[in-house]
Amino acid sequence: MSDGDIIIGIDAGTSVIKAVAFTLSGAQIAAAAVPNRYATTAEGAATQDLRQTWDDCARALRGLGDRIKDLAARTAALAVTAQGDGTWLVGADNAPVGDAWLWLDARAAGTTRQLSASPQIRAHFHATGTAINTCQMSAQMAHMDRHCPARLDRAEVALHCKDWLYLNLTGIRATDPSEASFTFGDFRTRTYSEIAIEAIGLTHRRRLMPEILEGTERTHPLTAAAAEATGLRTGTPVCLGYVDMVMTALGAGVHTGTPGAACSTIGSTGVHMRAVRDTAVRLDRSSGYVICLPAPGMVTQVQTNMAATLNIDWALRVAADLMADLGQPQDTADLVARIDGWMARSAPGQILYQPYISEAGERGPMVNPDARAGFIGLSAHHRFPDLIRAVVEGLGLAARDCYGAMGELPQELRLTGGAARSQALRQVLAAAVGAPVRVSAREEAGAAGAAMMAAVAIGAYPDMDACIAEWVTPLLGTAEAPDPALTRTYGALFPAFAQARDRLEPVWEQLAQARAAARDPDPATDDTTPAAAGPRAAQGGH
């Protein structure tokens, strides 16, 4: 083990790249953050500049060095996690092949529908445990192969965001077992599945799939070029973490051995997961993810709402835009503080809100790229606080919907993500799933999860369970019991929520057809040129 006393966790989310320093026993020392940006177009593209992402990561690490004296000498290891899904193509000399297609990119929607209807897709789902959706590299590469194959022809390897950063840190082209298995692999063996690859129609692109690297067992040294860019020492061990969803959940308490415990991350997306043995995974519903944990034989069964706080962001932007038109400009960040007050001024269960605000549709517990958000039950007496409450309640009912698809509802729900700071939101989530909630005191759970992998890799702990016992369990807060009356209200409301979701599907399809008819009918254009729309930042990570 190195003589250093600090482990750095890098968490490259959709909107922010963070570098966080921890002691070997898990105490957070300092953090530095750099804003991240991506570009969107009306055709559904959501892209990110690879070189800029690496430059911003290096800048975050240098910023951390400004906060901690002798950081380079004190660093025992660093680990990296990042936003998941998407497609980050790299060609000759490790140069980017255009901009990355992010998890928010909706251009593969048509291809996803066709793949979903294919008789071979069941074999893909059985291997990966993951339903095909527009977010994923598998769907995006299949779409590129059909509509812009030259893009794949120019590539030498297909990476994810954290893999791209690892390449810049170490010079190694690799991915981890979590993203490899739910994209093209088998979660039982943590290797690529030729059956899954064939089912997507990408056997002829097999050469683009990188080595699968287990970060708790193997690290690579920081290169001289990366050391110069980051201010760290050449040769520092670098650990390739798992995807940010599972790193955040690991840091927040998804896997502590507590029976019936589950973990929800309420950020841009809503990620709802429970830790199970890989032999206990339920595949009786063709939706969701199975994502490996960095612990032998353990995986997370996952249902993810494409949008969580993005729904709240939308509602607050509507309010801010209206106030600006009236000559009273407001920053949406200032309006966040009013949410609990608005909730207190409204009665529960009056309006149904389907929280499918993402332009890429929904992926949990149903996969539908056409799904869109909407209010049901508005009356003339309803005011803005009622709409805010409906949006928040929609997030709670969507969480219940996701957990119900995985089996029994949780007996305890651990919460992380910025929205967990809201007492009103915690109350809604507790009542919606009918379980007490606990919030981890861990400030940067995603970076902590990655750093925990590095701690095991360098021998600071004998295994992940020992690391969890010191880094995670002591930071879980007091359980907040659900309000019985609110639990009854949401229990009675949920059947209507689920019924509306099912019956709106043909409406969403007709609206999608209308949107397609109103715009350029060729959404498959290669994005090697800059996107037409300006940059737009998301709140939180994937």
Image: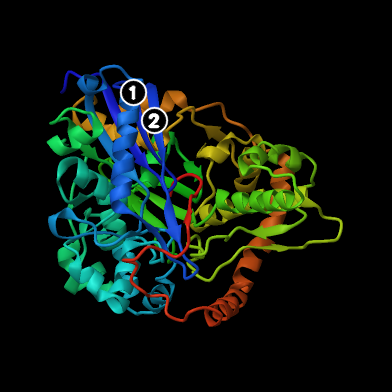
Q: Is residue 367 left or right of residue 296?
A: right
Q: Position of residue 239 (x, y in %)?
A: 22, 37
From the image, which quarter does the N terminus lie in?
A: top left
Reading the image, the residue beneath label 2 is 32
Q: Residue furthest front?
A: 327
| Mark 1 residue element | helix
Q: Is residue 128 left or right of residue 261?
A: left
Q: Is residue 217 left or right of residue 22?
A: left
Q: Considering depth in this image, is 500 or 18 the residue closer to the camera?
A: 18
Q: Position of residue 30 (x, y in %)?
A: 39, 23
Classify 10 Å Cα crowding around label 2: few (below 14), some (14-19), many (20 and above).
Answer: some
Tell me the amino acid under the disc marked 2: Ala
Q: CA distance from mark 2 to mark 1?
A: 9 Å
Q: Are marks 2 and 1 in contact (CB under 8 Å)?
A: yes
Reading the image, the residue beneath label 1 is 66
Compared with 311, 220 (above or below) is above
| Mark 2 residue element | strand
Compared with 453, 510 (above or below) is below
